[in-house]
Amino acid sequence: MKKYLALPVLILICMSAHAEKKDIKTALNEFGVMVGGNALNKKCNFLDEKQTKLFDKNRTKSGQRLKDWLLTENMEINQYALAVTNASLKLIEDEKYSSCGQEARSLVDAAFVISKAWAR
């Protein structure tokens, strides 16, 4: 009987670890949007002064939480975090965003919403 229970338990553990890794990557992607959106707002000045200060505060707070969280993660996740951040900052240099048009505004708005959710 123990043999029959061990396999499903092992499968659940593996599935849980996979789901957790997926959740981490989803969170890191959201953080990347926040970082890119914050940098883009500094360039394009879409948000007013009060919103910009709140965005900066939220991003800083979220960054610290993420840093504390990543201290317990493996090297692969930490490398992924760095890659996402760098890619986000590089992405805003693309003409699609650097021209400060509607797509840039949409990214900043989405990033600002994410920052508020993360700051809770």
Image (cartoon, rainbow, N blue to C red):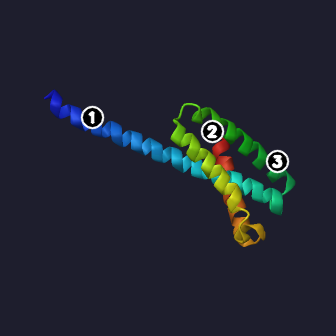
- Say what amino acid the circle numbered 1 marks: Val
The first of marks 3 and 1 along the sequence is 1
At label 2, counting other C-alpha atoms closer than 10 Å, the crowd grade (few under 14, some 14-19, many 20 or more) is some
Residue at the extreme right: 49
Give residue 66's mark.
2
Give residue 9's mark.
1
Question: Which of the two marks, 3 or 2, is nearer to us in this view?
Answer: 2
C-alpha span from label 3 to label 1: 48 Å
The first of marks 1 and 2 along the sequence is 1
The first of marks 3 and 2 along the sequence is 3
Taking depth in this image into account, of 114 and 14 the one nearest to the observer is 14
From the viewer's perspective, is 80 left or right of 93? left
> Which residue is painted at 84% across and 51% down in the image?
50
Percent of width and height locating residue 2: 17, 27
Count of numbered circles in the view: 3
- Say what amino acid the circle numbered 2 marks: Leu
At label 3, counting other C-alpha atoms closer than 10 Å, the crowd grade (few under 14, some 14-19, many 20 or more) is few
C-alpha span from label 1 to label 2: 30 Å
Question: Which of the two marks, 3 or 1, is nearer to us in this view?
Answer: 1
Q: Say which quadrant the C terminus sits in.
A: top right
Residue at the extreme left: 1
Q: Secondary structure at mark 1?
A: helix
- Say what amino acid the circle numbered 3 marks: Lys
Percent of width and height locating residue 101: 76, 72
